[in-house]
Image (cartoon, rainbow, N blue to C red):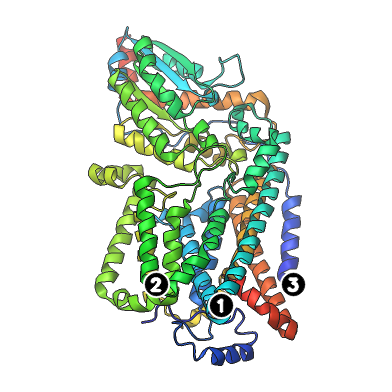
Amino acid sequence: MTSVADPIAGHPHADASSHVSASRASTRADAVLFPVAGTERELRLDLFRGLALWLIFIDHLPPNILTWLTIRNYGFSDATEIFIFISGYTAAFVYGRAMQEQGTLVASARIFKRVWQIYVAHVFLFTIFLAEISYVATRFENPLYSEEMGILDFLKQPDVTIVQALLLKFRPVNMDVLPLYIVLMLFLPPILWLMRRRADLTLALSVGLYALTWEFDLHLTAYPNGVWAFNPFAWQLLFVFGAWCALGGAVRMSRILSSNVTLWLCVAYLLAAFWVTLTWYIPQIHHLLPKVIEQWMYPINKTDLDVLRFAHFLALAALTVRFLPKDWPGLKSVWLRPMVLCGQHSLEIFCIGVFLAFAGHFVLAEVAGGAGMHALISFLGIVVMSTAAWVFSWYKGVTVKGGSRAKRSDADLAGGEA
Amino acid sequence: MKAVLRLTMLAGLLVAAPVRAEPPAHTCEVPAYLLTSESTLPKVEAAAKPGGKLDILVVGSRSSVIGVSDHSAAYPNRLQAYLKEKLPGVEVNVALELQVKKTAEEMAPTLEQLVTDKKPNLVIWQTGTVDAMKQADADDFRNALDEGVAAMQKAGTDVILMNLQYSPRTETMISGSAYLDNMRVVAQQHDVPLFDRFAIMRHWNESGDFDLFSASPGMELAKRVHDCLGRALSTFVVDAAKIKAADLRIQR
């Protein structure tokens, strides 16, 4: 029985520079306080983060055949949960080690540098979005949609809109994940500081904040109205839980995870969730769902990370950890390589995915539509994402081989993986 | 690098692909499952008797009409025409109450008074678009629907909910899924039929009946879509109210 707490990457590029990793491992050997040690990258994390990135991309395109492959059609949770959990896990792992080796101050500085990178990526995506809709606004005239085109009215007051976008308050469709990520990372230094001393207390505080969020309806407002689509007060729970797992929680949970009771609970819950989801798509069987359950269950709130969603993610994760061992040879197979590579360059690939989703919409609108074209665009998008990830890996491999200069920047690259 | 090369070639192919062929003559068929509802319309059923009078009120935002002044080609008017055809001997009257740029939360308090004043047998409440554009809070939206539907039912009318238009061009800008889901939930809770305009229009777009992506289709496409919506809606109403059109014919 392996668990997610088994060591992940000591080094972002273990295969390309094993000698560096080996030396690092020895310097870390005395760091027994830190529950994670080892040199081999945890490929399962990369694999599932890559998968999450692909699914997020597909979900951002208009619905098509591939949409039926995404998790959200088979249960309550979706790719966002995977992405945030793994982000918390890897961030805690990478920066936790940095805190150990370089001190809280330096590690915090590195985290803030990372926050800045994500912020810049967000602004970059916003610029592309503006370009696209400005184009649509000037070219598109369909009396059928005169009401819907009112959405472009905000272009008439760029002074307000652009400032609000820079303040992360104005977020067009599909651009909600990065602001959440920015806020979560911004609070990572104190979380990590406390987590390394009192892990369970930190998790308890996180659960407490989650409960307060539901009780008192804590939220961040958005522009022009409404709230953040992913409420950071609620979603922090997944992020902190990921961090808790990375810093030893998963090891302590391994007995629970390997028990058969857990197994059957998870299976039962996943099947129940699947059955509920079926009633959304097959109205004929909807009457089989008891009204009482329906009233208790709905709405399943994505904004505030509904407990049902969180539980669904936990069940999925528990089964995955149980049935997909860390050393499964398939993780290194050529076929899963593209997904793993994408997971290893999450920020870049996420941005490319959002950009490709915009571009895909654009092609569908301007060039051709139809189911075949839809599927082709989804497929091509994944090919582009994988190719880009491969190029990033190749480039990083080259720079690491480049000698001392690379060695110095390596810490940043490792941070860049979180 | 081979992959990159291949990709470039594919991209080239994409650009060179011929512009979509003209769609075939429109039939705008709607699959049966989109036009059946388990919920019923007892007040409509009672009114649609030979010599009876069926009053329908459409409450909606801008997407219930085309253009600004002339509403004759919009779906409420077409619904009236198709219902008259289907229900001979019944005096069908469809009125339209436009509430431009109003969210469901703003519309809901007005509904009870509207029903009391106009005494319709059926209210078709088209909503969700403005809410989606403003990204109104999903809970507030659902509560407003909940209250609006309850108030109208209490005031003595049948209710049909109508959801958003399928608008592929604005999909990157307007996220409708939360509003579509909530409308489905509220319809189920109050046992009122939901006319799934979104799914129907998407079906037409995918089956090639209409090219809803078209950049400058002019007025003609809008009119044809509304005509088809009116026809589908008339079938939906007759079906949900369990009116046997054949009976009406015989008695005439």
Instruction: Name the residue tied to disc 2.
Output: A199
- Chain label for disc 3: B
Q: Earlier in the sequence, mark 2 or mark 1?
A: 1
Q: Specify the quadrant of the image occupied by residue A35.
A: bottom left
Judge whether B47 appears above or below A100 on screen: above
Evaluate if marks 3 and 1 touch, with contact meaning CB atoms under 8 Å apart: no
Judge whether A174 appears above or below A411 on screen: above
Can the viewer see residue B19?
yes
Q: Specify the quadrant of the image occupied by residue A321.
A: bottom left
Secondary structure beneath dot 3 equals loop
Q: Residues within 10 Å of mark 3 (few under 14, many from 20)?
A: few
Circle nearer the viewer, 2 or 1: 1
Q: Is A340 displayed left or right of A204 in the figure?
A: right
Name the spot of residue A10 as percent of width and height, x first.
Answer: 55, 82
Q: Amino acid at mark 1?
A: Gly
Instruction: Name the residue tied to disc 1.
Output: A103
- Chain label for disc 2: A
Front residue of B146 and A360: B146
Name the spot of residue B167 as percent of width and height, x first.
Answer: 57, 36
Front residue of A394 and B120: A394
Badges 3 and 1, same chain: no
Between the residue at mark 2 and the residue at mark 1, the CA separation in whole angstroms equals 18 Å
Q: Residues within 10 Å of mark 2 (few under 14, many from 20)?
A: many
Front residue of A236 and B237: A236
Secondary structure beneath dot 1 equals loop
Instruction: Name the residue tied to disc 3.
Output: B1
